Image (cartoon, rainbow, N blue to C red):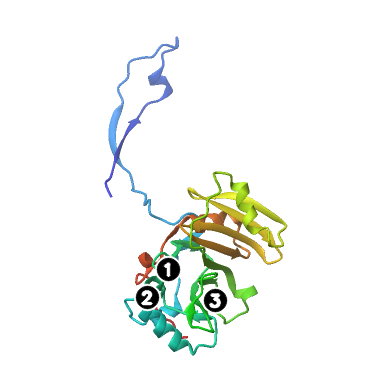
Amino acid sequence: MALSAVMVLSACSTDSLFSPDGVSGDWLADVEEVEVIPVATDLPPPELISSNSAVWPNDALASDAVEATEALALIWAASGGKDRFVQVARSDMAVVAPNLAFPEFIPESVAFVSSQLIFLTQTGELAQTPLAAFGLWSVEPYSLSRSVGQKAVIFVYDLGDEPSFEGDLTLGCSQFQDRALSSCDPVPVGQASGWWLSSLQGNILVWYVGALRYEMTVRPPITRVIGQRVAASSVPLATLVGTTEDLTSDT
């Protein structure tokens, strides 16, 4: 990063700058170069950390498949076919759903991220609504109850087509009219649109990345402002694969 220099005026008192009658006097300032310490511009926003600084335990389950059909078959076979929610490595999720995104930055209270694909148990096919889920944990996943250890959960829904609200964000609230909500508040999510929903389930932030709808339920200490910063940092999941500091855990 390049260093810059600033011009500093030294040894200039008010006496040297002004004469008794208020007219500027003659003076010569000494000029010295001061080294400016560069400030990094790629740091996470306040109260957030890189999602790659968290442990992703399911990355240890990677199948090394390079095609979606192969990855799905291996994942479903390994699961035993009994549970809709299947623990899956990020690399496999990126192969199966290459348009899947995840926040580049997460709340600083998060230490672990669990990652799941959701299947139709009758057929073994990948579901669409929801398609995937991510748990953001302050402790090792499932070592404590969700109400204690899980700080947020993100569900991803594949709607097939990107919705259009014709620039009127309040129209977006109509998509949730079948839910028992106490409020629906349109909010910005970076340069995109989002909605905060309040219900008995808590505060849920909804936003879109293409045709995929993301719904993040947050718990304290995550505020609405922090939640919007997290959502606004969404990037393709594939760009985060294989760069975490610790890809495995003892579980």
- Specify the label residue 139 is tagged with: 3
Tell me whether circle 1 and circle 2 mark residues in contact (CB < 8 Å).
Answer: no
Q: Gap in Å between the C-alphas at discs 1 and 2?
A: 27 Å
Q: Nearer the viewer, residue 19 or 169?
A: 169
Task: Residue 83 in the image: state x and y as whole percent.
Answer: 55, 84
- Indicate left or right for 74 with 127 as reference: left
Task: Residue 93 in the image: state x and y as whole percent.
Answer: 42, 73
Instruction: Tell me which residue sits at (44%, 75%) in the image.
Output: 56
Task: Residue 88 in the image: state x and y as whole percent.
Answer: 45, 79
Q: Amino acid at mark 2?
A: Ala
Give the labeled residue for mark 1.
53
- Indicate left or right for 234 with 182 as reference: left
Q: Secondary structure at mark 2?
A: helix
- Ranked by sequence position, the earlier of labels 1 and 2 is 1
Against 132, is 228 above or below?
A: above
Q: Secondary structure at mark 3?
A: loop
Please tell me in which quadrant of the rendered image residue 77 appears: bottom left
Dot 1: within a 10 Å radius of its alpha carbon, few (fewer than 14), some, or many (20 or more) residues? some
Give the labeled residue for mark 2.
68
Please tell me in which quadrant of the rendered image residue 72 appears: bottom left
Q: Nearer the viewer, residue 216 or 176?
A: 176
- Ranked by sequence position, the earlier of labels 1 and 3 is 1
